[in-house]
Amino acid sequence: MKQLIAILIVLVLSMPAYAGIKVIGGGDNIEIDTAGFPPNMKSAYDLMRMKCRKCHSLERAIVAIQTGVAPISGGIFDKGATAAYGVKMLRKPDSNMTKPDVKIVVGLLNFLLDKAEQ
Ligand code: HEC
């Protein structure tokens, strides 16, 4: 029994603690809590709120970050994939985004992916 408890403790301790990202609200009004973010990531989030909510809510990006899976296509959503998703959004008709905008948002997505894993 003691051994079993010891094994369980080791298992629990070796699991990564998913502190994740904090969200406020849900559905169409979902927001990311940027408290404690560095200033450049806070301004990147302001840009994301402005640009990425034109066609859908931030829920898609948030779910992708939290699960590692893009919610519509089911594709992998990791740091190797964020730039491609950014470009895909840029190329949508009337996306109203520039390449520099997308670069900034992709930087934020990567920052959030790191945070989601911590
Ligand atoms: C011009 C409209 C438009 C804008 C602006 C837009 N999106 Fe999208 N987004 C879409 C559409 C349409 C889809 C549906 C799936 C697809 O076509 O990729 C989508 C899907 C997504 C998905 C899910 C992709 C998948 O494969 O499951 C994510 C994540 C996403 N958007 C993030 C963003 C981010 C981040 C931004 C801002 C940089 C953004 N979107 C801006 C139209 C837009």
Image: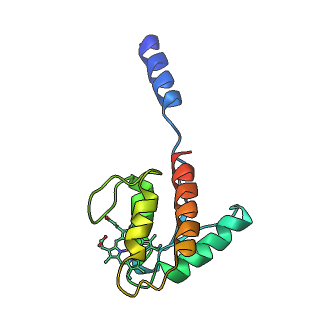
Task: Give the quarter of the figure containing the N terminus.
Answer: top left
Image point (57%, 52%), residue name: 115
Residue 56, image quadrant: bottom left
Q: Is residue 45 left or right of residue 38?
A: left
Q: Ligand 1 shows up in which quadrant of the image? A: bottom left
Image point (59%, 77%), residue name: 47
- Residues 1 and 67: in front is 67
- Residues 78 and 25: in front is 78
Residue 41, image quadrant: bottom right
Task: Please determine whether, in this image, residue 74 is positioned above or below residue 31.
Answer: above
Image point (52%, 71%), residue name: 102
Q: Is residue 93 left or right of residue 17?
A: left
Task: Please determine whether, in this image, residue 55 is positioned above or below residue 112.
Answer: below
- Residues 102 and 24: in front is 102
Q: Is residue 24 left or right of residue 88?
A: right
Residue 62: x %, y % from top left: 45, 64
Residue 98: x %, y % from top left: 52, 79
Residue 65: x %, y % from top left: 45, 58
Residue 93: x %, y % from top left: 35, 85
Q: Is residue 49 left or right of residue 11?
A: right
Q: How is the image coloured?
A: rainbow
> Going by the picture, which residue comes out furthest to the left?
73
> Going by the picture, which residue comes out furthest to the right?
39
